[in-house]
């Protein structure tokens, strides 16, 4: 077979269709079966650094390449690698990794809007993929990534680390076994302090160390409109998905597991929320209440990015930095022992709490709030992936691609409901959710939270997301509001960064 060069690969991938997928047999599938697994890590400013650290600590795993569009980040991580005795190559353009036969695995920790395309390219090039969440930036991309995995036979693990936790696995089996009665509701919460990203007066020049064209990839070639280049892309629709992904994708995945890992999407969704307290360049909601229709057991999700009470950051003109957490965030689900990021599973005979930290603890309480049981134990998600790379068995994976896709789609359903909704006064919202007691209680707490931040919903109404119905077979919206919602299932892709249609 004629070797695939970088030039021919780039040409093929830009024009890829269902008929132009490279066979996995074109490549050395078992290069690491009896030797080192050779890894490239793409996206190094946050999660990629942690992934590289974990792989660096594993026997039989060798980091051979580092990739980032920012050469300043590359230089920093190269220095870390060299200090650890490694000599990886550095690459700015992800595509340069693809024709290399000395790479078995690519770990993708780049911004959200690049994940699907880079994953497909990597699989087509015969690489196994460690896939940071989210799997996709929009609904349509999900079917294309799944098709690529099926056609190439690659091993793909999604980094929803909770799936390697024995504590969570045991708690799920215990709860679903009826030991606390029937599960009556599942709740996910992300009360994580997020600061304003600031307001620009015009286009901003990206750092000189950044290849901005490669960063944008599939997104429109538009000027940058934020003061900080890194991380704050999470809060703009062209590149990010808001806190439904930045943190919430993990809690969505845990919630689905307690529902039994349904292999279908929810039948419907609606949302209440908005971006409150800031006049900034952020676009995604910082206060969000989501209801997923899984039938008898509701799945309710809450996001709050403002503090428990006003502080000097709330809408302050000088607040231009966005933090992952901290900065005065004190609010918790006080009723549930101080939980501020995690899951709560309501049952007939009590409830379970699952904090996000390390996914190594689940606590069980009776209705009076007395703890009656604990499950403990953390797993090693990345080691599980490497084991599956060696065994070549998808069934060995704790976080398979199809489950990652199903949980990720919950993000997109919520965001599309929000983006196709309309503002309503508090009384109108209460009328819309009348008879849904748990939602009414949740909305009441949202209103209290906003009032504590001096936000009057009568004067600054919340957005009541369009109630949407979703068809599993076609992964598209049906019924009322479907036309507007379906326009957001995909995006216009910028050549040559086009996600190929494979399904």
Image (spheres, grey):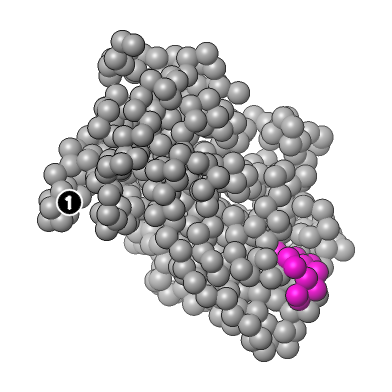
243 magenta-colored: no
The residue located at (27%, 42%) in the rendering is 35
Residue 111, image quadrant: top left
Q: Is residue 4 left or right of residue 153?
A: left
At 74% across and 32% down in the image, what residue appears?
A: 473
Dot 1: few (<14), some (14–19), or many (≥20) neighbours within 10 Å? some
Count of marks, rendered view? 1
* Residue under numbered circle 1: 81
- In the visual, does 368 lie left or right of 227? right
Name the foreground residue: 454 vs 78: 78
Name the image quarter holding the N terminus: top left
**Furthest residue in direction right, as rendered:** 435
**Percent position of residue 328, x then y:** 43, 75
Percent coordinates x, y for residue 254 in the rendering: 60, 60
Magenta segment, which residues? Answer: 176-187
Is 491 or 58 nearer to us in this picture? 58
Q: Is residue 19 left or right of residue 442?
A: left
How far across and how far down the image is residue 93, in percent?
Answer: 27, 30
Q: Secondary structure at mark 1?
A: helix
258 left or right of 110 in image: right
Q: Position of residue 31 (x, y in %)?
A: 31, 34
Answer whether residue 182 is magenta in the image. yes
Q: Residue at x 36, y 24 (%)?
A: 27
Q: Report the residue at 17% width, 38% height from top.
A: 89
In the foreground, 217 or 151: 151
Whether residue 355 is visible here, answered yes or no, is no
Is 145 located above or below residue 398 in the figure? Answer: above
């Amino acid at each position: 077979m004629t070797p695939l060069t970088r030039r021919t690969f780039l040409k093929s991938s830009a024009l890829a269709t269902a008929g132009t997928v490279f066979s996995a047999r074109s490549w050395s599938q078992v290069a690491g079966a009896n030797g080192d697994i050779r890894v490239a890590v793409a996206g190094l400013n946050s999660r990629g650094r942690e992934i590289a650290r974990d792989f660096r600590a594993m026997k039989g795993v060798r980091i051979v390449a580092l990739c980032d569009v920012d050469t300043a980040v590359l230089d920093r991580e190269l220095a870390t690698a060299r200090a650890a005795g490694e000599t990886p190559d550095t690459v700015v353009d992800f595509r340069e990794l693809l024709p290399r036969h000395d790479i078995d695995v690519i770990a993708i920790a780049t911004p959200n809007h690049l994940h699907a395309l880079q994953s497909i390219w990597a699989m087509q090039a015969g690489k196994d993929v460690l896939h940071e969440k989210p799997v996709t930036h929009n609904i349509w991309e999900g079917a294309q990534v799944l098709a690529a995995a099926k056609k190439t036979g690659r091993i793909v693990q999604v980094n929803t680390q909770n799936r390697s936790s024995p504590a969570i696995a045991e708690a799920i089996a215990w709860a679903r076994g009826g030991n606390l009665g029937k599960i009556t509701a599942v709740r996910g919460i992300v009360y994580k302090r997020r600061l304003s990203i600031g307001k620009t007066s015009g286009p901003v020049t990206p750092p000189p160390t950044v290849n901005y064209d490669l960063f944008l990839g599939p997104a429109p070639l538009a000027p940058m409109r934020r003061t900080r280049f890194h991380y704050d892309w999470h809060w703009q629709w062209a590149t990010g998905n808001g806190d439904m992904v930045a943190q919430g994708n993990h809690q969505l995945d845990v919630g689905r597991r307690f529902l039994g890992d349904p292999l279908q999407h929810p039948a419907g969704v609606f949302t209440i929320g908005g971006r409150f307290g800031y006049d900034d360049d952020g676009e995604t909601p910082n206060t969000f209440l989501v209801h997923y229709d899984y039938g008898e057991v509701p799945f309710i999700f809450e996001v709050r990015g403002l503090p428990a009470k006003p502080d000097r950051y709330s809408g302050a003109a000088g607040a231009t930095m966005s933090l992952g957490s901290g900065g005065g965030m004190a609010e918790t689900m006080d009723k549930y022992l101080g939980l501020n990021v995690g899951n709560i599973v309501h049952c007939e005979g009590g409830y379970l709490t699952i904090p996000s930290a390390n996914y190594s603890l689940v606590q069980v309480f009776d209705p009076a709030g007395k703890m009656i049981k604990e499950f403990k134990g953390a797993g090693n998600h990345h080691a599980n992936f490497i084991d599956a790379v060696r065994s070549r068995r998808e069934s060995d994976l704790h976080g398979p691609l199809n489950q990652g896709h199903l949980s990720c789609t919950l993000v997109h359903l919520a965001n599309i409901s929000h983006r196709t909704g309309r503002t309503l006064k508090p009384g109108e919202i209460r009328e819309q959710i009348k008879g849904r007691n748990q939602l009414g209680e949740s909305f009441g707490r949202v209103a209290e939270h906003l009032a504590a931040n001096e936000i009057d919903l009568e004067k600054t109404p919340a957005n009541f997301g369009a109630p949407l119905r979703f068809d599993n077979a076609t992964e598209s919206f049906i019924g009322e509001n479907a036309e507007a919602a379906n326009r957001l299932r995909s995006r216009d892709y910028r050549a040559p960064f086009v996600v190929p249609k494979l399904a």
